[in-house]
Image (cartoon, rainbow, N blue to C red):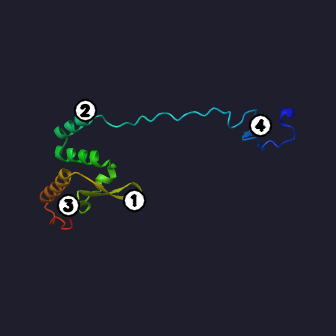
């Protein structure tokens, strides 16, 4: 080992051409690089999405709200926090946009279908009547 290393310090790395000798007879270029493991994430197939939507609209405490939330997530790919912080003021019915407040304070306007925009507004109106809250905000366009 002493003959291979010579009089270099133990922490000294020397350049040999374009490779770096790490002192163990190996260079960075000759080390085997392992590929990252493939991600287990994938998109849902349409039949799986249909089954989830069907199950949600037939069960639970509020099947209408469950189905509405699933459609919101399907159209916008928003995070759970973005859906939970949604307010009527975040809905633009005329332009079919919804403002999502998401992770890290990110705000984005996301296009949605006219049907989803109308269903979200109708749900807000129903919820307001059920809870006897004040008049619906007038800033919905």
Q: Residue furthest bottom?
A: 138
Task: Give the camera-side residue of 18 and 84.
Answer: 18
Q: Position of residue 86 (x, y in %)?
A: 27, 57
Marks 3, 1: nearer the viewer: 3
CA separation, marks 2 and 4?
57 Å
Q: Position of residue 114 (x, y in %)?
A: 19, 53
Q: Name the residue located 73 percent from the left edge and 33 percent from the top edge.
A: 26
Q: Which residue is mark 4?
A: 23
Marks 2, 3: nearer the viewer: 3
Marks 2, 1: nearer the viewer: 2
- On the rendered structure, is 5 left or right of 78? right
**Cβ–Cβ below 8 Å for labels 4 and 3?**
no
Q: Which residue is mark 1?
A: 105
Instruction: Please identify the quarter of the rendering in which residue 58 is found.
Output: top left
- On the rendered structure, is 4 left or right of 52? right
- On the rendered structure, is 54 left or right of 8? left
CA separation, marks 2 and 1?
34 Å
The quadrant of the rendering that contains the N terminus is: top right
Mark 4, other Cα within 10 Å: few <14 / some 14–19 / many ≥20? some
Q: Name the residue located 24 percent from the left edge and 46 percent from the top edge.
A: 71
Mark 2, other Cα within 10 Å: few <14 / some 14–19 / many ≥20? few
Q: Which residue is mark 2?
A: 47
Task: Give the camera-side residue of 58 and 42.
Answer: 42
Q: Position of residue 140 (x, y in %)?
A: 20, 64
Q: Which element carries disc 1, helix, strand or loop? A: helix
Disc with the residue nearer the chain's start (2 vs 3): 2
CA separation, marks 2 and 3?
32 Å
Q: Which element carries disc 3, helix, strand or loop? A: loop
Marks 4, 3: nearer the viewer: 3
Q: Which element carries disc 2, helix, strand or loop? A: helix
Q: Which residue is mark 3?
A: 94
Disc with the residue nearer the chain's start (2 vs 1): 2
């Amino acid at each position: 080992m002493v003959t291979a290393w010579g009089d270099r310090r133990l922490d000294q790395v020397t350049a040999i051409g374009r490779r770096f000798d790490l002192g163990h007879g190996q260079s960075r270029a000759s080390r085997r690089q392992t590929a990252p493991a493939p991600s287990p994430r994938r998109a849902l197939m349409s039949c799986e999405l249909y089954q989830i939507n069907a199950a949600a609209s037939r069960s639970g405490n509020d099947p209408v709200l469950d189905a509405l939330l699933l459609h919101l997530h399907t159209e916008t790919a928003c995070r759970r926090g973005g859906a939970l912080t949604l307010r009527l003021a975040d809905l633009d019915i005329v332009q079919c946009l919804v403002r999502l407040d998401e992770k890290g304070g990110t705000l984005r306007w996301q296009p949605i279908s006219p049907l989803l925009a109308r269903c979200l507004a109708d749900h807000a109106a129903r919820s307001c009547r059920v809870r006897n809250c004040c008049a619906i905000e007038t800033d919905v366009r």
